[in-house]
Image (cartoon, grey):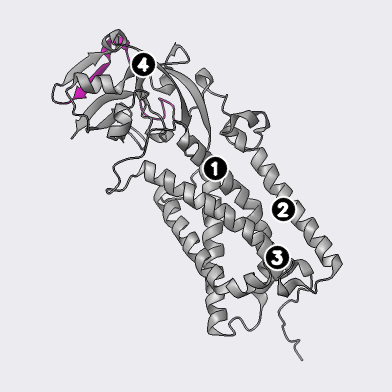
């Protein structure tokens, strides 16, 4: 007689609801922080039509929120693995669907697991700027964030009774657990916490510069790069050839349009500002910039106070060739058309001959190789 196939049996106590609940709390917190900061990042890069703009102060707000976004996403990796390890025996429960509630629970779990693994994996690859897929990262990552959040809310709603029974050590569902189980659980949770701490400490230095000496696993180090600043897109990658000083022209299109040479820009009043570059991949660093205030250029062009500005680059390849400054950023005295970095002329990879630098703004919108400013009313 052919032996009957039976689903595997798991007797380990650490695959229990209490352990899953504790790790789930931590993972839920990481996902919540990652989702909230991700909404901020996406809104700043792709502002909705009903939003007039984001504030320009504090100058490092985006640096903080995006650093927190990437740090919480990286912290979610060991938490997600631990959570999956804790609950994976339930994949083998039989029968696979026992009731409508059980079927809804399994559906929510399948959707949550698939979306969460996809979101974390693609986010990690984005920090390394490696895109081995045919789709555009930003819109898909943003859409999947909503899928993860929605499936997580559904999962919590379905599992609320179980979560309540195992929320704390004093909960009714955990009173009878043996002491040996409690010790093993503490060891597991300590190991998971240590893993979260390790991946955080060894990566967060790319944005939290006091810990940059421990920046061992992050793809960027804040001090590595031309003029002491990392470079995401070089002039060659952007299709910007050598720009001759006497051949450069900046067009300012407004009520009183003007064309300025690099020498003209250098003769205008010069200002200095200490502002961070904060990139969506998670790295950031403050630097000392010098150049002409955008507000001064707009006043010369007769732009009204409420005007927005379209900033156009010389680049011919890649995204974000054009960005837009809202009125708040355009009139902020710290927003510069930068000509210098760290007291030196901009290197070509940092945007020579002129680039935008503004407070509280994503790095992809700090347009390099600026050739035109268009006043929008």
Mark 1 and mark 2: Cα distance apart in space: 20 Å
In this figure, which residue is indicated by the disc labeled 3? 168
Asked which quadrant contains residue 259, the reply is: top left
Mark 2 and mark 4: Cα distance apart in space: 48 Å
Q: Is residue 240 magenta?
A: yes
Q: Main secondary structure of the magenta part?
A: loop
In this figure, which residue is indicated by the disc labeled 4? 291
In this figure, which residue is indicated by the disc labeled 2? 192
Which residue is at the front of the view, 326 or 15? 326
In this picture, is 260 found above or below 198?
above
> Which of disc 1 and disc 4 is earlier in sequence?
1
Q: Residue furthest right?
A: 180
> Which of disc 3 and disc 1 is earlier in sequence?
1
Give the quarter of the figure containing the C terminus: top left
Secondary structure of the residue carrying tag 3 is loop
Classify mark 4: residues with Cα within 10 Å, few (<14), some (14-19) or many (20+). Answer: many
Mark 2 and mark 3: Cα distance apart in space: 18 Å
Viewer can see residue 54: yes
Residue at the spot x=61%, y=75% of the render?
A: 161
- Residue 369 coordinates in the image, percent (x, y): 34, 24
Residue depth check, mark 2 versus mark 3: number of the one nearer the observer: 3
Which residue is at the front of the view, 70 or 236? 70
Viewer can see residue 279: no
Residue depth check, mark 1 versus mark 3: number of the one nearer the observer: 3
Q: Which mark is residue 68?
A: 1
Classify mark 2: residues with Cα within 10 Å, few (<14), some (14-19) or many (20+). Answer: some
Mark 4 and mark 1: Cα distance apart in space: 30 Å
Please report the bounds of the magenta region as a residue range: 233-254
Q: Residue furthest front?
A: 170
> Which of disc 2 and disc 1 is earlier in sequence?
1
């Amino acid at each position: 007689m052919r032996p009957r196939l039976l689903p595997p049996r798991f007797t380990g106590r650490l695959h229990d609801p209490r352990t899953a609940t504790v790790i789930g709390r931590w993972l839920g917190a990481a996902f919540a922080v990652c989702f909230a900061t991700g909404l901020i990042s996406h809104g700043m890069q792709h502002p909705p039509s009903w939003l007039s703009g984001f504030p320009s102060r504090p100058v490092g707000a985006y640096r903080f929120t995006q650093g927190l976004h990437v740090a919480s996403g990286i912290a979610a990796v060991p938490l997600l693995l631990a959570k999956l390890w804790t609950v994976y025996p339930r994949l083998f429960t039989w029968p696979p669907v026992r009731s409508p509630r059980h079927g809804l629970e399994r559906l929510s779990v399948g959707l949550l697991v698939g979306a969460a693994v996809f979101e974390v994996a693609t986010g990690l690859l984005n920090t390394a700027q490696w895109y081995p897929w045919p789709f555009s990262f930003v819109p898909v990552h943003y859409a999947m964030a909503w899928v993860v959040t929605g499936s997580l809310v559904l999962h919590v709603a379905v599992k609320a009774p179980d979560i309540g029974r195992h929320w704390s050590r004093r909960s009714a569902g955990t009173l009878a657990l043996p002491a040996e189980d409690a010790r093993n659980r503490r060891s597991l949770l300590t190991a998971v916490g240590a893993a979260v701490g390790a991946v955080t400490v060894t990566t967060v230095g790319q944005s939290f510069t006091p810990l940059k000496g421990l920046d061992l696993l992050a793809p960027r180090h804040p001090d590595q790069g031309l003029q002491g600043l990392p470079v995401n897109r070089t002039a060659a990658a952007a299709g910007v050839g050598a720009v001759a000083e006497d051949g450069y022209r900046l067009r300012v299109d407004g009520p009183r349009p003007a064309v300025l040479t690099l020498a003209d820009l250098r003769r205008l009043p010069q200002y200095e500002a200490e502002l961070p570059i904060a990139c969506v991949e998670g790295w950031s660093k403050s630097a000392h910039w010098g150049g002409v205030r955008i507000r001064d250029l707009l006043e010369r062009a007769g732009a009204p106070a409420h005007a927005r500005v379209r900033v156009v680059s010389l680049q011919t390849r890649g995204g974000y060739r054009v960005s837009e400054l809202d009125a708040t950023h355009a009139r902020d005295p710290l927003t510069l058309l930068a000509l210098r970095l760290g007291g030196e002329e901009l290197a070509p990879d940092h945007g020579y001959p002129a680039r935008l630098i503004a407070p509280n703004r994503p790095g992809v919108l700090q347009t390099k190789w600026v050739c035109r400013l268009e006043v929008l009313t």
